[in-house]
Image (tube, coloured by chain):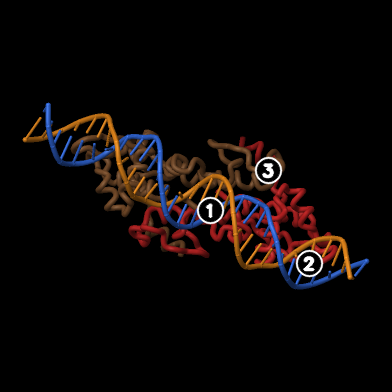
Chain colours: A brown, B red, C orange, D blue
Amino acid sequence: MLSQKTRYAIRAMQHLADHYGQGPVQLADIAEAQKIPPKFLTVILSELTRSGLVASQRGKDGGYWLGVPPIDVSYGDLIRIMRGSLALVPCASRYAHERCKNCVEEENCRTRALMLQVRDKTADLLDGINLSDNVEADAYLQAAE
Amino acid sequence: MLSQKTRYAIRAMQHLADHYGQGPVQLADIAEAQKIPPKFLTVILSELTRSGLVASQRGKDGGYWLGVPPIDVSYGDLIRIMRGSLALVPCASRYAHERCKNCVEEENCRTRALMLQVRDKTADLLDGINLSDNVEADAYLQAAE
DNA sequence: ATATTGTCAACTAAAATGCTTGAGTTTAAG
DNA sequence: CTTAAACTCAAGCATTTTAGTTGACAATAT
């Protein structure tokens, strides 16, 4: 599961994408529109700013905006930034690979082989969609349910 | 990420699958072979036994064995049993659907639409592979790296 | 009987999560 | 050059989750 923080980050970024090119958006506005505790949002936006995806300006009339065009921010990147990895196990991560605790034999691990496949499929999807895609929620939701 | 407990559960089940039809396997044997803390394994095997996937017998020469053929235990089921859901957000779960905390509008949520797709792809993969598949680790690992 | 093996609720320590506090720093405008 | 409006950020904190352990008990084969 994604943490609440990651989910807030996604919503905040969608909000910024929706206001791309319209100047700085203030934290309080994002917090209210997206129902995110304002003080917590400062932590989240700071992280995103440090990552380079978001730009900010302090002082009066300051605020936040996307540092790169929405089309260049994939959901995969977003989740990697907030969570560190897309994988279900550390040893199946591409960018943050780490040996699993108590692993018996990583080299020939059945679980790992499977989890690498899951990771790749997940990445295909999440890296293929970005903040400019206005995901056709209705269409997909209806087809799926 | 999958919890350590879920990873142990997967390894324990693979172990039982490897010894399917060979009579009861004792907890201590599984624990040693799979490097799982024995007392923790009792918790895990109890859960799996209660779920019906594993059968057990007490007393001398007792132990555990798969309650159903390996081919009938998909990794998807296994993860659902241990973790509750395959989804990345509660509102994208099929079998354990739950409204996300602080959700703004589930009905028309971009994130949800996306996460439902991710969930479906993940499920396709994890439900399509089971304990009798001896995942061609080497082949896949080499192709991927 | 007794040794062996699983069952299970309750407990615990440590880590992660979800926030808040509060003391800054920067900026625009008067 | 003062002030109010914003962002910045390390530290702290309560709660929940995770990863186990303890210990008392139940069943079974010999």
Q: Quadrant of the C terminus of chain B?
A: top right
Secondary structure category for the residue under label 3: loop
Taking C20 as reference, is B91 left or right? right
Whether the residues at callouts 3 and 2 have beta carbons within 8 Å, the answer is no
Taking B11 as reference, is B58 left or right? right
Protein chain holding label 1: B
Whether the residues at callouts 2 and 1 have beta carbons within 8 Å, the answer is no
Q: Which residue is mark 1?
A: B121
Q: Which residue is mark 3?
A: A103
User: x and y percent of residue B2 in the render?
Assistant: 58, 50
Residue under disc 2 on the same chain as residue under disc 1: yes
Going by the numbered disc 1, the residue's amino acid type is Lys
Q: Could you tell which of marks 2 and 1 lies nearer the N-terminus?
A: 2
Residue B129: image tag: none
Secondary structure category for the residue under label 2: strand
Q: Nearer the viewer, residue B88 or D1?
A: D1
Going by the numbered disc 2, the residue's amino acid type is Gln
Secondary structure category for the residue under label 1: helix
Q: Which residue is mark 2?
A: B57
Protein chain holding label 2: B
Separation of residues labelled 2 and 1 (CA atoms) = 38 Å
